[in-house]
Image (cartoon, rainbow, N blue to C red):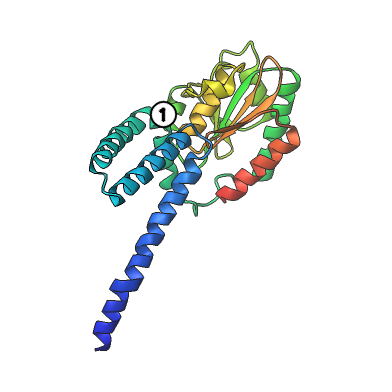
């Protein structure tokens, strides 16, 4: 009797709770990932259409229900086609293992080196695009550039991005405290409206942050201003202290 009661309790109460919890977690994580991107407005629109369909079904408005159902099917296909970068980023982030070990052996030295180097580039108005690989590998982008595989240093960063250097166009990618490649080609963001007045470096930084969990630093060659792209968002006009704060948080989160 107790066995049957326990089975009934599990099926009637525990399994529905687990089911709802999993769905709620997936929806919440999805919302966090697409929040602040152009996809969020479309998702809100789809939610309103679904709500309208439920209401029409409740009121037995069969023609309206059929029309809304057809509209939802078309809209879902359109979303998949139009928002491939956001979907790739979402699936990549859902597949990440947040409990992996630290990817830098000496984070303090790396933070200081990067912050000081970027500040020097900013003062000299030398354009730069620096990518820090985190959990999601950037092999395809690394292979598009020139292999360096050297220990990170301020002198090397400046040598890469000075105007006379053949490597100054494109991005330098850092992995585990080493500059693995330079002159790398990154995907450009299609969100031009958010970066009006900015150049290709900013579009490339935002584009990569939309498709991966990379942390991207940009120095404008025209103004010397420092910007940061991460998780599909761009932070403009960053100070050296703010950059160090973001780098410290990045390394802490990955450890």
Hey, which residue is sitting farthest top in the picture? 164
Task: Out of 177 and 209, give the one closest to the viewer.
Answer: 209
**Which residue is depicted at the point 44% across and 22% down?**
144
Which image quarter: residue 138?
top left
Image location (x, y in percent) of residue 135 = 48, 43
Identify the residue at horizontal 73%, vertical 27% (top origin): 119
Which one is in front, 84 or 154?
A: 84
Q: Residue furthest bottom?
A: 1
**In the figure, is residue 246 to the left or right of 79?**
right
What number of labels is visible?
Answer: 1
Q: Is residue 32 above or below residue 21?
A: above
In the displayed structure, 163 sits above or below 175; it is above
- Residue 158 lies, in percent from the top left, at 67, 22
**79 relative to 65, above or below:** above
Structural crowding at the residue carrying mark 1, measured as other residues with C-alpha within 10 Å and reported as few (<14), some (14–19) or many (≥20): few
Q: Which residue lies under the disc numbered 1? A: 140
Residue 1 on image: x %, y %: 24, 89
- Going by the image, does 184 lie left or right of 4? right
Answer whether residue 181 is visible to the viewer in this image.
Answer: no
Residue nearer the viewer, 212 or 128: 212
Q: Residue at x 47, y 45 (%)?
A: 31
Task: Choose between 29 and 114: the one closer to the eye.
Answer: 29
Residue 3's place in the image compared with 126, above or below, is below
Q: At which x and y percent is residue 230?
A: 56, 36
User: Mark 1 falls on what kind of element?
Assistant: helix
Say left or right for 80 vs 186.
left
């Amino acid at each position: 009797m107790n066995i049957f009661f326990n089975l009934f309790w599990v099926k009637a109460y525990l399994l529905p709770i687990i089911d709802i919890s999993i769905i709620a977690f997936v929806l919440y994580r999805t919302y966090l990932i697409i929040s602040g991107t152009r996809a969020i407005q479309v998702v809100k629109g789809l939610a309103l259409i679904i709500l309208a369909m439920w209401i029409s079904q409740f009121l037995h408005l069969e023609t309206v229900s059929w029309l809304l159902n057809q509209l939802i099917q078309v809209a879902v296909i359109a979303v998949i086609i139009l928002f491939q970068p956001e979907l790739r980023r979402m699936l990549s982030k859902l597949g990440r293992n947040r409990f992996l070990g630290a990817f830098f052996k000496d984070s303090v030295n790396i933070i200081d080196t990067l912050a000081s180097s970027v500040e020097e580039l900013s003062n000299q108005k030398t354009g730069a695009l620096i990518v820090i690989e985190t959990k999601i590998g950037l092999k395809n982008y690394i292979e598009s550039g020139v292999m360096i595989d050297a220990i990170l240093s301020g002198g090397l960063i400046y040598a890469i991005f000075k105007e006379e250097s053949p490597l100054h166009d494109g991005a330098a990618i850092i992995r585990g405290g080493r500059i693995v490649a330079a002159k790398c080609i990154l995907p450009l963001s299609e969100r031009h409206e958010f970066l009006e007045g900015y150049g290709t470096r900013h579009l490339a930084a935002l584009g990569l942050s939309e498709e991966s969990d990379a942390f991207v630093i940009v120095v404008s060659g025209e103004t010397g201003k420092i910007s940061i792209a991460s998780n599909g968002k761009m932070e403009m006009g960053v100070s050296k202290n703010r950059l160090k704060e973001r780098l410290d948080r990045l390394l802490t989160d990955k450890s």
